[in-house]
Image (spheres, rainbow, N blue to C red):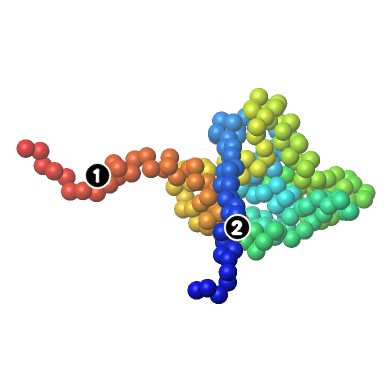
């Protein structure tokens, strides 16, 4: 239009954004999960069992309180977490976002093990003179919160003792839980809620590797819906 003498776009450079690399997700087989649980001891055995059976995050597992477990309804609620700070060390905190607050059904095996473990916790409370009762399911001998980083290190120790690959991390029990649910045909929206993901897209993107495998048998199911042809 002749309003300006030069076109500024002719000397502008375009930055091409590099595509983000998809983060590798490690999933344990059921045999590997069983080996891990066989190698783990004491309260860590139970917390790893719950991690696999619920998909809770590390901080959510350590922030779990007895009041959050409904033994009659068979549910577990996420209302608190444990974080590690430089100033105060391990401390009880709120979940990371609104979607992290959730109530999910848990298996009768987990409920049974929790009931047995509760007896142990009550015994420790009575024997400790300076017990700080925070109502935590998994607390130190003095009742204070565990260090989340320490839990991850403990997981590594038991992975090695079970003869499993060192590439596995505690968070992979969460991935294993979600992957197994999807493989069993559980709706991804239900998986999103159990994991506490803020968006459905996050769940779909994270576990996109599962969906191609779920197509097995679809062609046969479509054929089965067609009227049968009479043989000549």
Other residues around mark 1 within 10 Å, as few (<14) / some (14–19) / many (≥20) = few
Residue at the far left: name it.
Answer: 232
Please name whichever residue, 73 or 227, is drawn nearer the observer in this view of the structure: 227
Residue picked out by circle 1:
223
- Please tell me whether mark 1 sits on a helix, a strand or a loop: helix
Measuring 50% from the left and 56% from the top, which residue is drawn there? 189
Please name whichever residue, 191 or 131, is drawn nearer the observer in this view of the structure: 191
Q: Residue 207 at x, y = what percent? A: 52, 46
> In the picture shown, does residue 7 fall above or below 135?
below
Residue 229 seen in the figure? yes
Measuring 73% from the left and 39% from the top, which residue is drawn there? 152
Residue 74 seen in the figure? no
Relative side of 185 to 43, left or right: left
Pick whichever of labels 1 and 2 is earlier in the sequence.
2
| Viewer-nearest of discs 1 and 2 | 2
Looking at the rendered structure, which numbered label has been put on residue 52? none
Residue picked out by circle 2:
12
Q: Residue 153 at x, y = what percent? A: 76, 36
Other residues around mark 2 within 10 Å, as few (<14) / some (14–19) / many (≥20) = few
Relative side of 110 to 200, left or right: right
> In the picture shown, does residue 168 fall above or below 143?
above
Name the quadrant of the C terminus.
top left
- Kindly indicate the quadrant of the structure image that contains residue 43: top right
Please name whichever residue, 63 or 198, is drawn nearer the observer in this view of the structure: 198
């Amino acid at each position: 239009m002749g309003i300006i003498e030069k076109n500024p776009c002719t000397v502008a450079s375009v930055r091409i954004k590099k595509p983000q690399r998809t983060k590798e997700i490690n999933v344990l087989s059921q045999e590997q999960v069983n080996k891990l649980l066989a190698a783990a001891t004491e309260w860590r055995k139970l917390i790893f069992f719950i991690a696999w059976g619920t998909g809770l995050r590390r901080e959510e597992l350590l922030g779990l309180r007895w009041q959050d477990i409904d033994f009659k309804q068979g549910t577990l609620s996420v209302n608190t977490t444990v974080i590690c700070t430089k100033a105060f060390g391990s401390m009880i905190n709120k979940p990371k976002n609104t979607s992290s607050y959730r109530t999910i059904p848990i298996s009768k095996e987990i409920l049974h093990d929790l009931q047995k473990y509760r007896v142990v916790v009550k015994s420790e409370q009575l024997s400790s003179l300076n017990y700080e009762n925070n109502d935590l399911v998994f607390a130190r001998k003095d009742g204070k919160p565990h260090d989340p980083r320490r839990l991850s290190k403990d997981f590594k120790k038991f992975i090695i003792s079970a003869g499993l690959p060192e590439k596995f991390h505690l968070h992979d029990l969460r991935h294993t839980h979600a992957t197994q649910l999807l493989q069993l045909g559980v709706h991804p929206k239900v998986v999103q809620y159990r994991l506490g993901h803020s968006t459905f897209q996050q769940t779909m993107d994270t576990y996109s590797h599962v969906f191609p495998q779920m197509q097995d048998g679809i062609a046969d199911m479509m054929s089965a819906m067609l009227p049968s042809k009479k043989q000549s």
